[in-house]
Amino acid sequence: MEAALLEMSASEPRERLLAFVDEVVRPLPHVRQRENALLYVRGLVELGGRKSLQPTLVRLGESPARYESLQQFLADSPWDPRLLLRACAERVAPEIGVLAWVVDDTGIKKDGSHSPGVKRQWSGTLGKIDNCQVTVSVHAVGASATLPLGWRLYLPEEWCDDRERRAKAKIPAAVGFETKPALAGTLIEAAADWQIPLAPILADQAYGDDSDFRSRLSELELDYVVAVAAHTSVYPPGTSFVVPARREGAGRPPSVASADRKAESVRALAERLPAKAWKTLPCRTTPAGEDVAGRFAFVRVVAAHPVLRDRKPPREGWLIIEWPEHQEAPTDYWLSNLAPKTPRERLARLARLRWTIELDYRQLKGELGLDHYEGRSYPGFHHHCALVTCAHAFLTLERLCPKARRPD
């Protein structure tokens, strides 16, 4: 996305921005809310520098009274950020050729202890344990662009149990502790009801290792390709599952099928596959249009945890394994519930597509100030994320439109 768009001075792009924001903020119930949303998004898109509220309004030449109004709009106003996210998604998702939905989370470094959810915790974004917030997000990834679909701030248990901190951060009483996979599942379930293209859900190991997350997606009849750890247990091809006969005098008859063999780790299964099981396939296309290939195997398996621990019926799916030619062991494993006849190249490309989400985070933070919100309000954080999404969605349309004249 061209940085020049952020210094929007030409009247034609500004008119398109005003028209776009006017369209997507219509679901907001009050005129003043729509006016404040438009002003905030203008500040995110048109001007460089830090995107926190006060310096943005100074650059826009707005009055102290407007600052008070916008601060209340962000931190205290009860408008639902999902209204804006849905409007952006339904306007932009059909334009980007959606290939997948990607789940991820990002860390936002913070000082102090008052911002909602902040603590010393692991952040993959920062690559270390640091004082930060972590937000879970879902993004539509297309052939030509990406688009955020939802945001939820992760609240550690110590935050959920602290009434005083909750009150100061305006955390609603209904918000309790949820794991990151549970937060992601809620975001996905909400977006699946919108008028946007459905696509396979992609996620890294932190989400793929959660069998409840995988089961939730299957129950929603959503496809997925998710990374899992090498020790993940599966039942190999050829496993039979039979419901045991009722033993005399043993109460209710069994209802859960038992396997005719023990489960094994995905690494153990990979290591005993024959040479003919491995295929070199294109799995990624670079920005320059060049295909990158990988060495993969594809096996139909049944994940063991839902059967053994959750007492659920066996559900067959794909195990995708990548084992580069000169590596001592496989480097990556994925589980997928895509159909048995899914082309192998599509499975490989979906497994390797998740990296594109980094482009979203780079633009959302580096250009649009996703990590610049300085308020201490839980609703304010989510309002800010929705408005940043609106700015991102507009710039995506600008980049995709061949007739849109770029500022000099």
Image (spheres, rainbow, N blue to C red):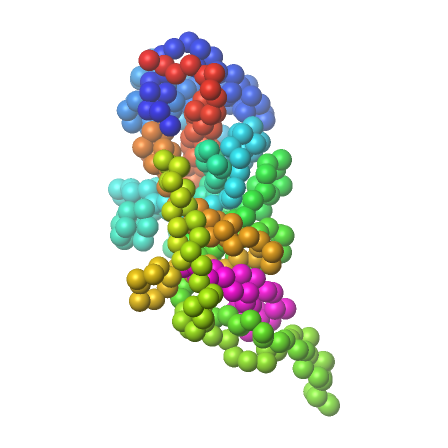
Closer-to-camera residue (170/193):
193
User: With 127 as the anchor, is 234 left or right in this view?
Assistant: right
Is any part of residue 56 visible from this angle? no
- On-image quarter of the C terminus: top left
> Residue pushed farthest front?
276
Closer-to-camera residue (114/59):
59
Q: Is residue 317 magenta?
A: yes
Q: Position of residue 361 (x, y in %)?
A: 37, 38
Closer-to-camera residue (399/17):
399
Magenta segment: 296-322
Closer-to-camera residue (59/165):
59
Q: Residue at x 45, y 43 (%)?
A: 137
Q: Position of residue 28 (x, y in %)?
A: 56, 26
Q: Residue at x 40, y 71 (%)?
A: 271
Q: Residue at x 58, y 75 (%)?
A: 239
Q: Is residue 221 magenta?
A: no
Q: Residue 301, relative to residue 164: is it above or below?
A: below
Q: Residue at x 52, y 41 (%)?
A: 99
